[in-house]
Image (cartoon, rainbow, N blue to C red):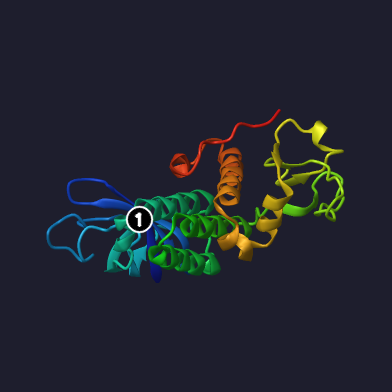
Amino acid sequence: MQAKDQVICLRAVNFSETSQVVTLLTREHGKVAAIAKGSRRAKNTFDGPIEIFSRGEVVFIAKESGGLAALTEFNQQPHFRGLSQNLDMLNAALFAAELTEHFLEEHDPHPPLFDKFLIFLETIQEARQEDQILAWLILYQLRLLEETGIGPMLDACTNCSISIHKNRAGIARPAIYFSSSQNGLLCSACEAAFVEKRAVDFAMIDVLKNPARLPKAGTKNLTEIERLLIYHFTELLGKPPRMAKYFSETPQIIL
């Protein structure tokens, strides 16, 4: 079946001396893995070898039996070459692309996520500070979890459903924990029953519940939030994301 769609390239690897295998995030057809025959030839129909983060309109033929689709046209628009001029930008973009590829199923469309990924790339390419880049990466990671149906529960304990919120100033607050396997928070009364968990701070959870505060969260909070997300992604995937090492060490699970 032939299809036409808007895409952003998530990954491109050489398949032979003349061809590539690419993973594309399409707006209406979801994640598509395709072979681009002849893309590495001097003259081809793809405007040159396909580059990661290239966007534009493609035509591809999906096989009914599954397997790689056949890419026949790609009008590449290299809007994001500026990412390679800043290592922090590039690493953030590569991390977001890696997670997107991991958490999306083949041919499962998520048009809002496509739009958010496009905005993310456009925004970090214009960012000038490391904190800004990290804040936008965290925001995209949260949107990815929400869009794929695994957004964490941050308002109540996932075990007993008691509401978890920040107490008034001057009143002692019980400890809270985040459990990846439970996909949310555990209160101090329930946490002992769960081995896999990580202690978290109320301020961190407050920012996660109100992402608009991310740009002003500060380096320390942003770093801790990203470490928490890396721990969560590691548990979900069964291994650390490849790009996680460029942002923080993978936190150890608290037993």
Q: Estimate the x, y position of residue 127 in percent, counting from the top left.
A: 42, 63
Residue at x 56%, y 59% (from the top left corner):
139
Q: Residue at x 59, y 46 (%)?
A: 229
User: Residue 232, how many percent across, how many down?
Assistant: 61, 43
The answer to whether residue 1 of the structure is visible from this angle is: no
| Residue at (39, 67) in percent of width and height | 126
Q: Is residue 125 left or right of residue 207?
A: left
- Please, is residue 20 above or below residue 235 in the view? below
- Give the farthest residue toward the left: 42
- Say which quarter of the image contains residue 74: bottom left
The location of residue 100, given as percent across then percent down, is: 49, 54
Looking at the image, which residue is at 70% across and 52% down?
Answer: 203
Q: Quadrant of the C terminus?
A: top right
Relative depth, front residue between 201 and 233: 201
Look at the numbered disc 1 and give the secondary structure of its residue: strand
Question: Which residue is tagged 1?
Answer: 34
Farthest residue to the top: give it. 255
* Amino acid carrying mark 1 in the image: Ala
Q: Position of residue 201 (x, y in %)?
A: 71, 46
Residue 231 visible in the shown view? yes
Q: Residues within 10 Å of mark 1 (few under 14, many from 20)?
A: many
Which of 22 and 142 lies nearest the eye of the viewer? 142
Q: Is residue 198 above or below residue 208?
A: above
